[in-house]
Amino acid sequence: MTTPLCTSTCTMTLLTPLINPEKLKCVQDGVAALKATTYLTSAWRPRKYQRHLNEIINADKVLTEDLLQSWPGCKKLREEVTKEMNKHGLKSGQAVALPGMSRHESGQAFDIMINGITDEQRATYFPSNRQENVVKLL
């Protein structure tokens, strides 16, 4: 597999259940060439954990300010959901795959944060990325 950041071919087609170090190094080397840094945020995860992340994001979507105005008793739940989001590094409106649909469950994806690149570099190398700093590689 060749990535926009990797001029060489990564030799393995799938990640191991933990992480494929060759693919991670390939991406890290490409990012370093841009004078930026990476931070691995997620790799393989079990379906139960994927379900938990999905439940948190779904609760976040429901517990809006409008709902809290009508149902003030839900404020405690909103606080708990916000704590869980912070604990797992989730952002409001973030896309999270349904359990059974995430490539993280099969070890075929990892997420990294990239710090130190310009908006132009981000648009060039990650044009379809929905999250500002998270890159998903398959």
Image: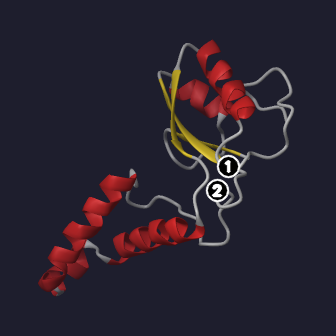
Front residue (pair 65, 57): 57
Task: State the residue at coordinates (27%, 62%).
Answer: 82
* Element at label 1: loop
Mark number, residue 104 = 2
Rendered position, 27 above or below 86: above
Task: State the residue at coordinates (87%, 32%).
Answer: 11
* Element at label 2: loop
Comes first in the chain, label 1 or label 2 = 2
Quadrant of the image occupied by residue 1:
top right
Is there CB contact under 8 Å for labels 1 and 2?
A: yes
Residue 87 coordinates in the image, percent (x, y): 32, 54
| Amino acid type assigned to the residue bearing label 1 in the image | Ala
Residue 28 coordinates in the image, percent (x, y): 63, 24
Mark number, residue 34 = none
Q: How far apart are marks 1 and 2 (CA)?
A: 5 Å
Front residue (pair 115, 66): 115
Rendered position, 73 above or below 100: below
Residue 127 coordinates in the image, percent (x, y): 66, 39
Quadrant of the image occupied by residue 105:
bottom right
Front residue (pair 47, 131): 47
Badge 1 density bin: few <14, some 14–19, many ≥20, Cα 10 Å: many
- Count of number-bearing discs: 2
- In the rendered image, which residue does mark 1 sit on? 109
Quadrant of the image occupied by residue 19:
top right
Front residue (pair 125, 14): 14
| Amino acid type assigned to the residue bearing label 2 in the image | His
